[in-house]
Image (tube, rainbow, N blue to C red):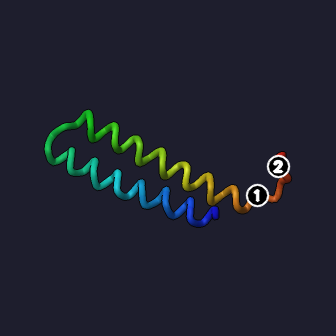
Amino acid sequence: MKKSSVRLLLTAAALLLIAGTLFGFAQSWIYAGLIWSGAFGCLVAALNFRDAENDDEPHED
């Protein structure tokens, strides 16, 4: 389950980076910046999911 979540978040980040690049070419820099910040958020979430898989500490789940 966690691997598919990480894969989906990385795919979303890649697609957001492509969309931000398209807005950059259109010189809509505000939209490009917002989309790139969303891509950065997806990348951070993917890294957190991937690192949570290796945690040895017990959680209260």
- The answer to whether 48 appears left or right of 53 in the picture is left
Residue plotted at (56% across, 59% down): 5
Q: Secondary structure at mark 2?
A: loop
Residue placed under numbered mark 2 in the picture: 59
Task: Report which quarter residue 30 is drawn in.
Answer: top left
Task: Report which quarter residue 52 is drawn in.
Answer: bottom right
Instruction: Give the image location of residue 61, x and y in percent.
Output: 80, 48
Q: Is residue 3 above or below residue 28?
A: below
Residue plotted at (62% across, 55% down): 49
Which labelled disc corresponds to residue 55?
A: 1
- Asked if the residues shown at circle 1 and circle 2 are in contact, with their CB atoms under 8 angstroms apart, the answer is yes
Instruction: Give the image location of residue 6, x and y in percent.
Output: 55, 60
Instruction: Give the image location of residue 43, x and y in percent.
Output: 49, 52
Furthest toward the top, the residue is 30
Task: Report which quarter residue 37 is drawn in.
Answer: top left
Camera-nearest residue between 59 and 61: 61
